[in-house]
Amino acid sequence: MQSEQVAEFNYRPSACKETYRMVVVRKNISVEKGEKLLFDRIVYFFYISNAWVPEANEIVFQANGRCHQENLLAQLHSGVRALTAPVDNLVSNWAYMVMTALAWNLKAWWALTLPEQPGRWQEKHQAEKQWALQIEFKTFVNAFVRLPCQIVRTGRKLVYRLLAWNPYQSIFFRLVAALRC
């Protein structure tokens, strides 16, 4: 992105009696490959609001903050499949919705349970906890639930051996250590 301009004007649709505030963001984007400029692109974003007090750039920041809610809805739809109705009656669909809500809550509980030890790793642990709260459900399942594991019974104990490595294992083992205490 090379530059960004914000402008505003009054807007009244032809079928409405009320006047609204239109905020326009113009982004000048240069598409490059390496150091070579391929082409310039100008993109416009329009925001309609009935709030007259905040500045135009604050309207844009508020709208962009709400995009996170849209991401959560998209995750519920595709990741957990909470917004699909797979069965033909309401009771079964209600049970399906409860199961997906429990799975979503498990992910949130798991992330909130991650310990943040004070010391030199505290900032890293806080960042990992924030990341775990924000990841998509599919990523959570693939990184922390679908772990290939060999269970070996030796003597009087069970030994769990992870058979593959992923970059999130340090987070996983930190939670396992916290849950054992």
Image (cartoon, helix red, strand yellow):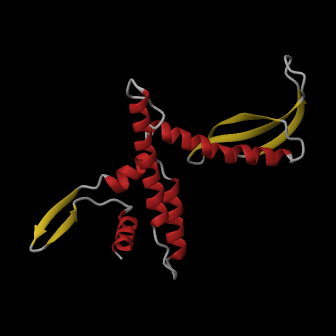
Q: Quadrant of the C terminus?
A: bottom left
The percent coordinates of residue 2 (x first, y second) are 72, 46
Give the residue at the far top of this rendering: 15
Tell me the residue at 36%/56% (across/down).
144
Residue placed at 82% from the left, 42% from the top?
6
Q: Among all residues in the image, which is located at the extreme bottom?
A: 119
Residue toward you, 179 or 49: 179
**Foreground residue among 111 and 8:** 111
Front position in the image: 106 or 91: 91
Which percent across, then down, holds residue 90?
44, 28
- Picture layout, residue 127 above or below residue 57: below
Residue 130 to residue 62: above or below:
below
Q: Nearer the viewer, residue 162 or 107?
A: 107
Q: Is residue 141 left or right of residue 29?
A: left
Instruction: Give left or right: position of 34 versus 107.
Output: right
How many numbered marks appear? 0
Residue for point 35% across, 64% down: 169
Q: Is residue 23 visible?
A: yes
User: Is 132 above or below relative to 79?
Assistant: below
Q: Residue at x 74, y 47 (%)?
A: 62
Residue lying at the far left of the rendered structure: 155
**Image position of 21 (left or right of 89):** right
- Residue 113 lies, in percent from the top left, at 46, 66
Residue 123 position within the rendered picture, expressed as x and y whole percent measured from the top left: 55, 73
Looking at the image, residue 15 lies above or below residue 120: above
Residue 3 seen from this side: no
Residue 168 in which image quadrant: bottom left
